[in-house]
Image (cartoon, coloured by chain):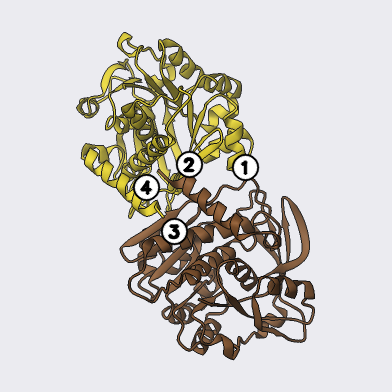
Chain colours: A brown, B yellow
Amino acid sequence: MSLVIVGSVAYDGVETPHGRVDRMLGGACTYIALSASYFTPVSIVGVVGDDFAQEDVDLLAGRNIDLAGLERVPGKTFFWQGVYSQDMNDRETLRTDLNVFADFQPKLPESYKSQEFLMLGNIQPGLQRQVRSQMSNPKTVGGDTMNYWIADFREELLATIKEWDFLLINDGEAKMLSGETNMRKAAAKILQMGPNTLVIKRGEYGAMLFRKDDYFIVPGYLLEQVFDPTGAGDCFAGGFIGYLAQQGISLSSGDIDRRELSRAVIYGSVMGSFCCEEFGVDRFRTLTRAEIDGRFQEFKKFTEF
Amino acid sequence: MSLVIVGSVAYDGVETPHGRVDRMLGGACTYIALSASYFTPVSIVGVVGDDFAQEDVDLLAGRNIDLAGLERVPGKTFFWQGVYSQDMNDRETLRTDLNVFADFQPKLPESYKSQEFLMLGNIQPGLQRQVRSQMSNPKTVGGDTMNYWIADFREELLATIKEWDFLLINDGEAKMLSGETNMRKAAAKILQMGPNTLVIKRGEYGAMLFRKDDYFIVPGYLLEQVFDPTGAGDCFAGGFIGYLAQQGISLSSGDIDRRELSRAVIYGSVMGSFCCEEFGVDRFRTLTRAEIDGRFQEFKKFTEF
């Protein structure tokens, strides 16, 4: 089934202990889309400025990503700059220039409206809700959010995720949203806010999926070297929702194969791990589906007992 | 097969967000022994003062732990006092009175010397080595250590673990011992120091086992409530080595069933999780082997895909 992805398309400046790139393709929508494109047909909604390079259009188009919803307007593309700590568990934002993203009003092309899956990247909750309402009858809707919306746009966020089938956030955000430090309690509270499925990303420690009366946990993949963690969480999201779309597993249906959900979490983890192996989106220039399935088997091997 | 455990037997004063106990049975040897006693015959070596209570002797004896090597000398038993942070991921030591433990010179009773398994709790590396030399021909030897010995007794520690089959430490200690922040690189370096098996505990995030060309990772059990994490790492050790001893799996042999090693890590995780459910050793007053095997099955359920 086909998947619509909404979110930021950006340029990033990133410094890690392994190097520095002043300007490279980035943004949540970009990472989610590249990742999901290995599993299912993908259409994106975003906005870029007139500085957006043809080679970046080509990279996305080369992965068969539908760019009908990628609006190009006068001005500069969203720019983010950050520097990672030595162990790469922390990062400091040096600069955020919203540029054309400041006035982003996502509009879905007609061809998108009847698609089955909708993944809302981290943007203002009101915009996420407005995109949701443009879809005719999606089978699975969900997305991501961040600390800023949880703290300062709480009511709007709650009204937004109430309509979602799944919420995909990190452990810090789950604690903040629920007000609970215990993960089991946090998950139980969030599952009462609307989504029937909650996925919690834990960075290097892996991920968890919660549904009423059931949960699944996977440890993170042990990379020999993490070059750049930028986008890993979004690539996780792309692998997770991309696999579900590929398998035609709708999260709005009552009866879902628990094994398939777990596999979606594994594919998310696989895609997140590949993302860290090179700077920015570079790993996706060479990554193959065979490598993805190979790493899926590795996960089986190192977790089975 | 039978198991000899060496380490501290102590009284602890502990404060967590859930309560406070001024004085209760504790010590690495105590926790390891109680945990391992669910799997295999256990004999302990330690020292206590003349203040050591009969009810604490009774608790250990009640789990069929051989106390022939528990020396009682004039003076006070080792006392440790600490307070945990709100999220219980940090703790501050308020007081450490070594008391009779300061002059601990472990002596193995004759009946211990021919036993098959030896687990050396965290004590001064030279003492660990001296205990090792008292055993006639153990099939499996290993143990724990801590940041203090890694930093200030490095050469002595390296000479000690060189003779071990397994080393069981936490992730911070593994980084410190290896000088590597990447876990895969850290493990590879440590496996060149002597032990053929390295187990790394990651607290709430679970545990990892490394051998040459192979590894296994399990996430941590999600407790609804952590009352007191004191001793959890030692209970992990007891479950891990206790299960191997029960199954008669010698880590000095060349060919070991990888599944059995993984199961030992799961039993370690199971025992660590139970330990946190009540203050100090209290959970072991009621815990049954059926509950242990039940939680083992839970681990299967929430990690399988």
Give x and y (percent) for residue B174.
Answer: 55, 36
Q: In this view, does B105 lie above or below A87?
A: above
Mark 3 lies on a secondary structure that is strand
Question: Looking at this view, is A90 or A251 the one in front?
Answer: A251
Q: Nearer the viewer, mark 4 or mark 3?
A: 3
Res B216 label = 2
Give x and y (percent) for residue B56.
Answer: 24, 28
Marks 1 and 3 sit apart, C-alpha to C-alpha, by 24 Å
Which of the image's four quarters has the N terminus of chain B? top left
Which amino acid, mark 3? Met
Q: In this view, does B31 lie above or below A143?
A: above
Mark 2: few/some/many CA within 10 Å (<14, 14-19, 20+)? many
Q: Name the residue under label 3.
A: A208
Question: Looking at this view, is A9 or A175 the one in front?
Answer: A9
Q: Mark 1 points at which residue?
A: B181
Marks 4 and 3 sit apart, C-alpha to C-alpha, by 26 Å
Mark 2 lies on a secondary structure that is strand
Which amino acid, mark 2? Phe
